[in-house]
Image (cartoon, rainbow, N blue to C red):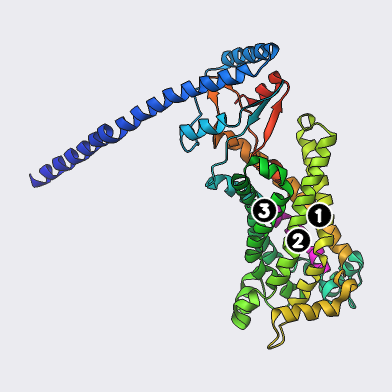
Amino acid sequence: MKLTRAISLTNFVVAGSALGFQVFVLYPWHKELDESFEKLKKEHLRVMDAAGDSLSEPQRKALSDKMNELKAQSSRSFHFVNHAPNPREAISAAKERILPTKDKLMIAVAKENPMDVSLYARYALAGAFCCAFTHAVLTPVDVVKTRIQLDPIAYSSSLSKSARHIVSAEGPGALLTGLGPTIAGYCLQGAFKFGGYEYFKARAVDYLGQSTAANNRNTVYLGSAAAAEFLGDIALCPFESIRIRLVSQPSYATGCVSGLAKLAREEGISGLYSGLGPILLKQIPYTMATFLVYEKAIQTAYSVVDKREVSSMGATGINLGAGLVAGLAAAVVSQPADTMLSKINKERAVIGESTSRRLFRIASELGLRGAYTGMQARAVMVSGMTAVQFGIYGDIKKVSLNLDPLFCRDTLLRLTDFALFQIFGATDGVELSERYVAVDSYSEELQQAAV
């Protein structure tokens, strides 16, 4: 009897709670949503009227024809608030960016959600994969380059001769020394590098505003690259330290985990981060040069060819070519610091010698000529690696954004079956997160805008 009453009481409480939730929570929310929906429809119509007033008669006719064509295709529901923080922000972001000109309508993109974790997680994942993959593939070249830097007397400056010398003396497996820490370290570094670059770039646009950021885009590129690389280097440094130890002293440890444990046990945190200074001196200029030169190379390429007419394969080819040029420039800029990094991680520091004094001593011993030891091997490695990185990164990012496009994050004006705005994002890791596009051919552009 008591059990039956307890069950009945429990059912009553559950049912009452559900009813109360519907009456006091769901119904007011639904009513508010309906009111917002009606307001949003009115705002849409106002914006459409404003856009129509800025068009010439032929453009109005083309726009009307395209709208009718889109309506005939299928019946789609409104999706204008799918991922926007709220309807008012979505509409105000759209309205503020409609700028009439003579015969063109400047169409703007809604601002990115500053806390869109999933978007930057995809950027980071793409960066982690492309950096880990390219560094892993080029591990043999990196081993030869490091050996040349550490012992230029035993190993000639020729990449092929040094590789043959290592294989004959230690076997083919020696060329894969340090593969574990290479993959782990550059997976983390790539995530911070590419994901952070996109994040800081977007935040710079938010802080400076579209116009100021566009007028100072080089500064935005350089600052974003430096900030992202700094975080990436913090994650990379311990793995790079053990990688160089394993390459210079193959018997130091059996692998990445045991090597990190041994280094931490014997030298502590200072041992794991003994090469942080040279890494920062190497990687930050390297990344700044890489992104800036890549940006300029892409800009130059698309000033010669029409981006809309370039196939997917052609776009990948342009990414690879721009990455190759950027890699060569970055290799020249960062080579001295790379040589110093190899030297500083080869052996323990002298007791009582500070890091700055140690760096100064190594730089004095090397000189300018010594600082560029192994340049040939590193130029081959870095240029090829950078080209493939940007090629892979661009393709992965395009795939991920196609799965969940930018217009699904901050959805813009969308009335019944007609999408007025063509959505653009930071494509190929190089462009500002907000941009404007002039629509010259409405039939073509609106077809691209239809989703």
Residue assigned mark 3: 224
Whether pointer 1 and pointer 2 mark residues with C-beta atoms closer than 8 Å, the reply is no
Residue assigned mark 2: 285
Under mark 1, the amino acid is Gly
* Majority secondary structure in the magenta region: helix
Under tag 3, what secondary structure? Answer: helix
Span of residues in magenta: 130-145
Whether pointer 3 and pointer 2 mark residues with C-beta atoms closer than 8 Å, the reply is no
Foreground: disc 1 or disc 3 = 3
Q: Is residue 412 left or right of residue 381?
A: left
Task: Report whether residue 346 is seen.
Answer: no
Label 1 and label 2: CA atoms lie apart by: 12 Å
Residue assigned mark 1: 327
- Identify which residue is drawn at 85% across, 60% down: 379
**Number of numbered callouts drawn:** 3
Label 3 and label 2: CA atoms lie apart by: 12 Å
Under tag 2, what secondary structure? Answer: helix
Q: Nearer the viewer, residue 252 or 434?
A: 434
Under mark 2, the amino acid is Pro
Disc marking residue 101: none
Is residue 404 positioned above or below 114 on the image?
above
Q: Position of residue 151 (x, y in %)?
A: 85, 77
Q: Earlier in the sequence, mark 1 or mark 2?
A: 2
